[in-house]
Image (spheres, grey):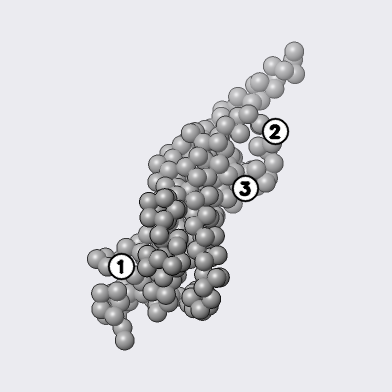
Amino acid sequence: MYHRENAVKMDTTPDNVTQRNAWWWGGLLLTPIRWVTGYMFLSAMLRREFYVPAKMDPTSPEYTGHKFATFIPHALGIVKPLLTYFVDHASVLYVIAVTFTMMEALVGLFLITGFMSRLAGLVSVLLSAGILAGAGWIGTTCLDEWQIGSILIATGLTIFLSGSSAFSVDGWLLRRYPMVAEKNWFRWLLSGELAPDQRRRLISMTLAVGVLSAGAMLYSYQAFFNGLWGGMHNYSKQPHL
């Protein structure tokens, strides 16, 4: 009985409760970000597979693969030769279009349901970086593709740091299997409180995420639009020949 009571006291010390609540509240407060980010990815699959199925038909003028050619002129870095290769090889392009669409669907579902939240947030960053580097320069009325890619990188990294708590599958798993939640793979792939040594690095990690997000935004802003210095331009409205 003594040990049991002592264990209860140990588990309910103010420090433990504060730490646990801090992570729980962090995941809770980011729920709107997680849901909206998730639907932005899920909606891409819904448009192509259900609303406008011609987008996934290589014989249709609306085939989404045709967009890859429009990305090439001002794509950044290694993305440009990759896009060129895909466009030159129609069968590969179709596989890439299907794979990208399915990845967007899975990331969207995982973020909305809060399952494997940290992994889904990290994969969303990779997808968003691809979108930004390939299509960030395109925008018919404003700098919309650049804005979408930049903000999704930031939200994905933020979700990766925070995980999810309430209204999530991860939160249910944390409550249902508390012993599994102590495993490092669970913390880094799903959600939950980071280990003490990892918590000490959280400030540095958050600063690095902020610098990475801002750096990607500012670099692409200058590369695509000369938005920081030089004469600002929008190639989708005034083509560069």
Residue 17 or residue 233, whichever sits in front: 233
The amino acid type found where label 2 is placed reads: Met
* Label 2 or label 1, whichever comes before in sequence order: 1
204 to 77, vertically: above or below = above
Residue bearing the label numbered 3: 188
The residue pinned by badge 2 equals 179
Check the image and report above or below for 161 versus 170.
below
Q: Nearer the viewer, mark 2 or mark 1?
A: 1
- The local crowd at label 1, few if under 14, some if 14 to 19, many if 20 or more residues have their Cα within 10 Å, is some
What residue is disc 1 on? 139
In this rendered view, identify the residue nearer to me: 112 or 54: 54
Residue 52 in view? yes
Q: Earlier in the sequence, mark 3 or mark 2?
A: 2
Query: Which of the two discs, 1 and 3, sits closer to the camera?
Result: 1
C-alpha span from label 3 to label 2: 15 Å
Q: Is residue 146 above or below residue 22?
A: below
Percent across and percent down for residue 134 are: 44, 70
Q: Nearer the viewer, residue 218 or 167?
A: 167
Q: Number of numbered discs present?
A: 3
Q: Residue at x 69, y 41 (%)?
A: 183
CA distance for labels 2 and 1: 49 Å
Quadrant for the N terminus, please. top right
Asked whether the viewer can see residue 135, the reply is: no
Query: How far across and down, in percent of the image, does residue 195 sit?
Result: 64, 43
Q: Residue 23 location in percent, x, y? A: 53, 38
Nearer-N-terminus badge (1/3) = 1
Q: Amino acid at mark 3?
A: Trp
Residue at the farthest bottom position: 241
